[in-house]
Image: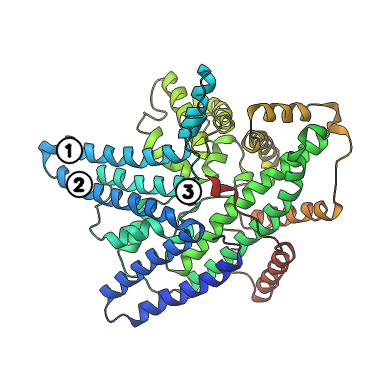
Amino acid sequence: MLFNSFEYILFLPIVFMVYWAIGYAAISEKMKLRLQNAFVVLSGYVFYGWWDWRFLLLIAFTSLCSWGSGLLIRRYQTDCSSSRASAFWLWANIVVNIGILAIFKYYDFFVREFGRLFGVETDNLLLHVILPVGISFYTFQALSYSIDVYRRKLEPTRDIVAFFAFIAFFPQLVAGPIERATNLLPQFCRNRSFNYEQAADGMRQILWGLFKKIVVADSCAVYVNQVWANYDTHSGSTLLLAAVLFAFQIYGDFSGYSDIAIGTAKLFGIRLMRNFNNPYFSRDIAEFWRRWHISLTTWFRDYIYIPLGGSRVEKWKIVRNTFVIFLLSGFWHGANWTFIAWGAFHAILFLPLILLGKNRKYTSDNIRWRDCPKMLGTFALVTLGWILFRSETIGQAWHFVCGLADKSLFSLLYIESAKAILPIPIIICNLLLFEWRNRNRQHGLDIASRKTAWRWMTYIYICILILAFGAQPETFIYFQF
């Protein structure tokens, strides 16, 4: 079920009304909590099962394994002589969950590449299984629970319904943010009350997310898809425009989803972590990765980079650790050499900063106009990386970049439909102006403190744009991950 679909327009208000009606109808606070959590699980499974009900068993199995492992880890941690047993149950859960992810997402890739390497026919060994939507997201979320329990950062819950709600909470089930159990799970273990200000801000953030997805991302996608379909026939100037527009497409698409998810959660009294913080205002690559897909970046930092020693080790280990997390981040996105190359590209960009101790140079949100040259330079590097991300093969990415270096870079643009391309500069300017004006706030429409008339004019303007550009809802890019 897509956030920008007609089905979801019906689904959300029904779930919202039933959820809070349960809270008012329950005869006790304990019953209210249990019934609301049970309904969160039910609504999450309906939301996910709308795509393919068969994979509900996979989510339930992942949830059950992680919940059970938490109890077993803590049980054996209480006995000092059983530390190996607690580690066993941690690794058992990791192996099971990563194993499931590997089978669905990576098995065919490794078998196919093995066959190419040794010249062996492998077609009869391929599984050709459908990749379950969001499997990378909810798998990492489940793993964070058992790891945090093992590290004693979190007490395991015996409330299986609350745990299943933590995994199946529908706003962030299929494309994040990848929530930590330390943040989200406790919210399902305590009573929640409706908060009008929180819900109103949630509606504003949903509206902003829809603007980014429907107006920005989907508009850019029309031109980007046209060019990429025949990239070898276009001029360098056309390829450059397509590369820039894809940068805004993927940002509007993914950050738009995150805004809708975070805003929707607020309607239910739940606070999710921020996943994007105006990444295209970054002044270097290190700052970009602190602002882009924050939930995944911090996951790899806390569970892989720091355990490997982080940046407080020998220089060669810093290099190793940097490449490990960026290559894993790339491979997390998909079983394709282009994603691995994309991760390696960012590791190469990031490495000089961390070796010179400049990776924490820009940690404040105090961004000013005079930082524009640095922001443009960072954006150019990121956009170059997005070519790898968008390409289907390394060869395609190479030819695309070579096309950018051609003298045709200074020729006229290819425009098949003026109607499709002309509004895009205005749309992108709107996006950047809203985000720049509210760069120190939680989202682009975080304008509750402004004058009422101005706010409502803004809401109406955004709604008009959404209705004007939302005739054909497009799926979200990150659903494939």
Q: Earlier in the sequence, mark 3 or mark 2?
A: 2
- Residue 384 percent coordinates (x, y): 67, 33
Identity, as a three-letter code, of the amino acid under mark 1:
Ala
For the point 36% across and 58% down, the residue is: 166
| Dot 2: element | helix
Q: Nearer the viewer, mark 3 or mark 2?
A: 3
Q: Earlier in the sequence, mark 1 or mark 3?
A: 1
From the image, tell me which residue sits under label 3.
132
Q: CA distance from mark 1 to mark 3?
A: 32 Å
For the point 44% across and 19% down, the residue is: 316
From the image, tell me which residue sits under label 1.
85
- Residue 350 percent coordinates (x, y): 55, 30
> Where, by quadrant of the figure, is residue 104 drawn?
top left
Residue 457 visible at all: yes
Instruction: Sort mark 3 into few (<14), some (14-19) or many (20+) by Cα contacts within 10 Å.
Output: many
Nearer to us in this view, 70 or 119: 119
| Dot 3: element | loop
Identity, as a three-letter code, of the amino acid under mark 2:
Leu
